[in-house]
Image (spheres, grey):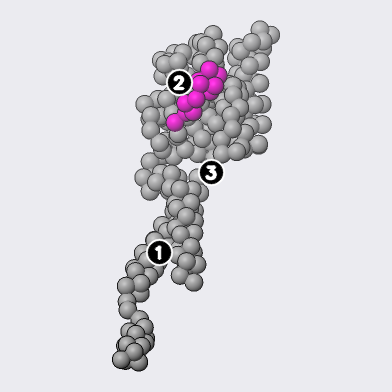
Amino acid sequence: MKNTKAKIFVIMMIVGLAFCLAGFSDAMLLFKGKKVDLNKSSISDFKESALVDGEIDFVYGPFATYEESHRDTDFFIVGSFTADSYENMTDEEFDKAFYVVLSTSDKDMKKKLTAASDEWTDYLTDDEIPEYDVPEISIDFEGRLSEQPTDKEYKDFYNDTVNQLSAIGIEKSNLAKYRIEARKINKSAIAVLLIGVGVFLIGFIGFIMSALSDKKHGGEFDDSEVIDETSADSDLN
């Protein structure tokens, strides 16, 4: 019975820890409250984790498909400008424009981004399309800023893409350090974190109390054994 109780408390600690890990990262961003607007920010804002949203016009890719959390994630390059701002941008404003890696595992978002990329590829490579016939695309998104993958396979894909983009005037210095994870950040992440902390603490406290109780009872003398030994000695005498 004692072992069963201890096992239950250990399981509670493991479950609580799993909940904490699942909700921790997003919950911390929600607590922090920092949000970046892709269309109104600068490239220097893309150097640390934050919430992010905005409107996408320019898309290139996908340049890589990568498995994250057991889901196929496509990686694109997106521009910081909207369709409206692109048509009216001065040379100085265009020089300030920057580009960001955006990753998504959402099927609908993948389709939208791939279709937008095809439009831009046709516009940039087909000489028969007039220069003024700029693709007018508007894809709303939300998500978070995260570090890019660091393994060699991804880096090779990324570096190849940088070389290809240089042919259309997009240099590596125009690419932001962090990437956009395009996915919905639910406020329920805070609840998940708090539930995890609560379950873990209950399990931890319960386990400690159970261990202390076992130690206390293990150190006590059994009075009946003392009485029996005394009686046996009397009988011998």
From the viewer's side, name the closer residue of 120 and 228: 228
Name the side, left or right, on which 47 lies relative to 105: left
Res. 207 mark: 1
- Circles 2 and 1, Cβ within 8 Å, touching? The answer is no
Q: Position of residue 147 (x, y in %)?
A: 44, 31
Res. 170 mark: none
| Residue occupied by mark 3 | 184
Q: Which residues are magenta?
A: 147-157
Mark 1, mark 3: which one is toward the viewer? 1
Q: Callout 1: helix, strand or loop?
A: helix
Q: Which quadrant of the figure has residue 116?
A: top right
Whether 58 is drawn above or below 67: the answer is: above
Q: Gap in Å between the C-alphas at discs 2 and 1?
A: 51 Å
User: Which residue is outermost to the front?
Assistant: 237
Amino acid type, callout 3: Lys
Q: Gap in Å between the C-alphas at discs 2 and 3?
A: 24 Å
Amino acid type, callout 2: Leu
Image point (32%, 76%), residue name: 220
